[in-house]
Image (cartoon, rainbow, N blue to C red):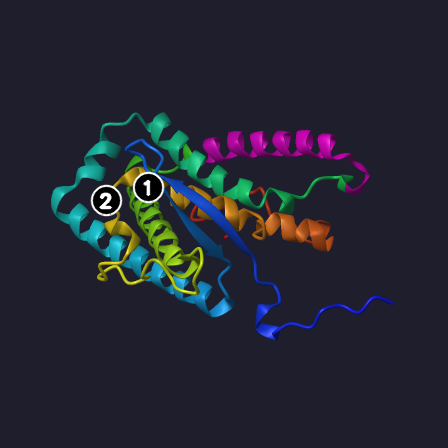
Amino acid sequence: MEETKGIDIFQLGKKEEIVKIIDPSGGEDYSLIRLVKMNKKEAGECFAISRNASESKKKHLLLEESTNKVRSAFAANLQTPDVIEMLVAYEKSEMLVNIDLLSIADEKDMSKEDLKVAQDVKVKEWEINRSKEMTSEKEEALREKLVQRLIDTEAIAAGNMAFVDAALGYTCYLSDKDERIFSSDPSDQRHVSNLRDERIYGQISAAFHKFTQVFAAALKDIRAAAGRGSDFTISTKSQKDATGSPS
C-alpha cells in the first residue's frame, strides 16, 4: 500500500495559484502574483472590515438623506406601479439566492430541468401575489421602503468592496516569496486602492473572484451536496412588513 506524504497540519487545505497581471499601458510588462486561500481567522477579519464599512456607509447615507433627500425625491417622482416593481425586484433577488428552499410538490421525483421550471412558476406566482399585496399599502409607506432599500443596497455594496479589498491584502503574495503584496489596512500606502491604474485592480479582483470560486460554494449548493434541500421550506405567502424571502 502506497504511503501518503506527511506535511505540516497547517498546510492541509491550502490552495495556491500563480496569476499574471498585464501592464494595461501596453508592451510586454507584467507581474506575477501568488494567490493563497485565506484561513478562517483572516476571512473573519475581512468580514469584520466589511461589516464595519457597510454600517459606516449606511450611517453616512442616512445622514445625507436627512438633509439632501435625493433618494426621497427619486422615489417621489416614480409612479406607484414602478415603486412596487422595484420593491418586488429587490425581494425577488433575495428569494432567488435561496430558491432551493421553496416548497415544491413532488420535488424528489423531478429532474433538474423540471424542478427549474416548477421553481420559475412558483416565483412568478409569488411576484404576482406580492405585487397585488403591495397595492393595498399606502403610497407613502411604499416610497419610504424604497428609499430604505436604496440606502441598504449602497451600504451593502460598500461592504462588499471593503471585503474584497481586505481579502486581497490577505490573499496576494509575491510569486517567489512568502510575503504579502498589499495591506488590508485602508490607511496603509500598500492598500490595493492605491494602485496606479483601475485596470490593474480589475485584473487582480477578477483573478481573486475566479480563484475563490474554486473552493467557495453558495449556500444552496452546500445544501444540495448535503442532501438537505428537501428538509427546509420557505413560505411564499409574504407579510406586509416582511420581504417574502428568507433572511
Quadrant the N terminus occupies: bottom right
* Closer-to-camera residue (75/150): 150
Q: Which residues are magenta?
A: 108-133
Q: Residue at x 27, y 27 (%)?
A: 78
Q: What amino acid is at disc 2? A: Arg
25 lies left or right of 36: left
Q: What amino acid is at disc 1? A: Ile
Q: Where is residue 31 drawn, in percent x and y?
A: 38, 46
Q: Which residue is mark 2?
A: 196
Residue 108 in view of the camera: yes
Q: Residue at x 46, y 63 (%)?
A: 43
Residue 85, by quadrant, is top left
Q: Residue at x 28, y 57 (%)?
A: 191
37 lies left or right of 25: right
Residue 203, by quadrant, is top left
Question: Callout 1 environment at 10 Å: few (<14), some (14 to 19), or many (20+)?
Answer: some
Q: Which residue is mark 1?
A: 200
Is most of the magenta stretch helix, strand or loop? helix
Residue 244 in view of the camera: no
Q: Is residue 208 above or below residue 36?
A: above
Question: Callout 2 environment at 10 Å: few (<14), some (14 to 19), or many (20+)?
Answer: few
